[in-house]
Every structure is written in C-alpha cells, then in structure tokens.
Amino acid sequence: MAIDGVQVGGLGCIVADRKESEAIAQLRASSGRSAREVWPEARAILAAAGQHTVPMFYAALESMAQLSIEDALAAPDAIVRALACLDSRIGKRRLRRMVAVKVATALEAKCLALRLSVEGIPVEAATDASSPTRGIPTR
C-alpha cells in the first residue's frame, strides 16, 4: 500500500494468499476443526497483523468508510486503524497525544508518521512499533 508515493505496507497477492493458507492449516492442526470453521479466525488474525488478502483489504476499506473515528481507531483490523491515523477527523491536538503511544503494527506507525509529518508534528516517538499495544487514545 502506497500513500502519496510512500510505501507504508502491504503484501503481494500470492504472499497474502499463502499466509492465509498457512494460518488456516495451523488453526486446523491445533484445533481439529475444518478449514471452513477456522477460516474467519485465520482472517481475523491476519487482519490484526495488517496482512490482508485482496478481498480482505477491500472489506477493510469499506468498513473504514462506515465507522466513526473512535471506532476506527479501536478496530481489530490494522488497515482500518492505519487509515484512521490519516483521517482528517483526527485533529492536531489528538495527533500530538498519539505521538506518545506505541501502535500495534509497523503499518500503523508508518501511517501515523506520515500524517504527523504532513501536519508538522515531530514524528520520532511515532515511528517505533516494536512494543505492540492498542492504546491509541480516542480523546
């Protein structure tokens, strides 16, 4: 995924499909359930990590367009949270508070850093995604 010519994340189609297949196989092996039963769980795991297949990516875009900014920032899907960082409904005061909070994925960190850069807010504290938390403040 590129935003204004800046690569912020994403997997190729083949890589994403392979990761989905691997997640399904691991869940099947550990639970004994069918592929159909574990498929939603596998997709949720991948979405939380920002590793989307093409259909998952489009579904995330569609859901982002229908969420309040608070719901988008707290969404279980990393793409939705990353796009929320770019959303103009987040003002500069909230962005300044978000600098101190570590985000869950590198994708979110890159999107937040890009938005902070555009707004002229120092980005040093926002670019480290090494300590995953979901504590992006909503107010």
Image (cartoon, helix red, strand yellow):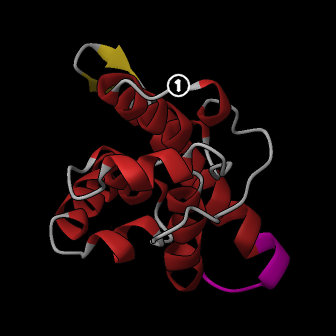
Residue at image point 39% right, 23% down = 117
**Residue furthest right as drawn:** 30
Q: Residue 53: x, y in percent? A: 39, 48
Disc 1 on helix, strand or loop?
loop
The reply, left or right, for residue 24 in relation to residue 95 is right
**Residue furthest front as drawn:** 93
* Residue 60 location, quadrant: bottom left
Residue at image point 43% right, 47% down = 95
The reply, left or right, for residue 25 in relation to residue 126 is right
Which of the pair 68/53 is nearer the observer? 68
Residue range corresponding to the magenta coloring: 29-34
Residue 106 in view in this figure? yes
Which of the pair 89/48 is nearer the observer? 89
The reply, left or right, for residue 76 in relation to residue 120 is right
The reply, left or right, for residue 45 in relation to residue 129 is left
Residue 50 in view in this figure? no
Residue at image point 37% right, 74% down = 70
> Identity of the amino acid at label 1?
Pro
Q: Residue 101: x, y in percent? A: 66, 52
Q: Is residue 7 magenta?
A: no
Q: Quadrant of the C terminus?
A: bottom left
Which of the pair 23/46 is nearer the observer? 46
Vertical order, 78 against 35 (above or below): above
Count of marks placed on residues? 1
